[in-house]
Image: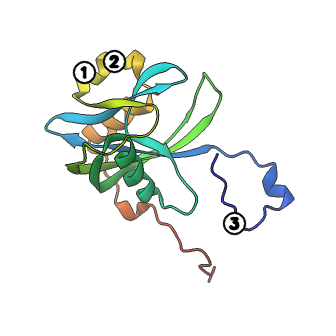
Amino acid sequence: MNVDRTAAPLISSEIDVWRPRVTVATVVPRDGSFLLVEESVHGKRVINQPAGHLEPGESLQQAAIRETLEETGWHIELDCLIGVQQWTSTASGSQFVRFTFAARPLRHDPLLTLDEGIIGTLWLGREQIQALAERLRSPLVLDSIDQWIDGRRLPLDSVRQLAPGTPAI
């Protein structure tokens, strides 16, 4: 678990507040295919978009770029926000709020060591992904791709990070 030790101490009312897991994901299309990762999660091989948790002090956009590079070795440029999805895992009961971005692949670094648990990367078309539905890490994978195919595009500045100490005018 990431803990920001430099943050102000929590007040007692904040300690008991339930919080969903905030994650990011990136849909990276290229020539009719989408960049995916095959990963091992709790001993099971699953397929997912490049995705992961927001880290302390980082913007959602920075997290999406970082996770894509760490999991795939691809440098990307974000194009847009596809949307925000909310999902509860029936396996764990964990609730996720996921910010999904679309990006252009710029260049691949094949020498980069990928995150622990990543088996490899795949470029698959939508129908190939549908055929692997039982191996998808969550329903968010195909939902995100379908939203992108359907033309869902929100400006990147739909999500803004205010600097620490920004006054509430």
Residue visible at 45% across and 54% down in the picture: 63
Q: Amino acid at mark 3?
A: Ala
Please identify, in this view, whether the residue under mark 3 or under mark 1 is nearer the observer. Answer: 3
Label drawn at residue 128:
1
Q: Dot 3, crowdedness within 10 Å: few (<14), some or many (≥20)?
A: few
Q: Amino acid at mark 2?
A: Leu
Residue visible at 25% across and 47% down in the picture: 109
Q: Quadrant of residue 119?
A: top left
Residue 15 locus on image (x, y percent): 80, 52
Q: Secondary structure at mark 2?
A: loop
Q: Quadrant of residue 28?
A: top left
- Decide if residue 150 is on the left or right side of residue 49: left
**N-terminal-most mark, 3 or 2:** 3
- Point out the residue furthest to the left here: 31
Picture quarter with the N terminus: top right
Q: Quadrant of residue 31?
A: top left
Residue visible at 62% across and 78% down in the picture: 165
Give the spatial CA distance, label 3 vs label 1.
44 Å
Q: Secondary structure at mark 1?
A: helix
Label drawn at residue 132:
2
Residue 83 locus on image (x, y percent): 41, 47
- Provide the residue designation for mark 3: 7
Residue 47 locus on image (x, y percent): 38, 26
Q: Nearer the viewer, residue 17 or 45?
A: 45
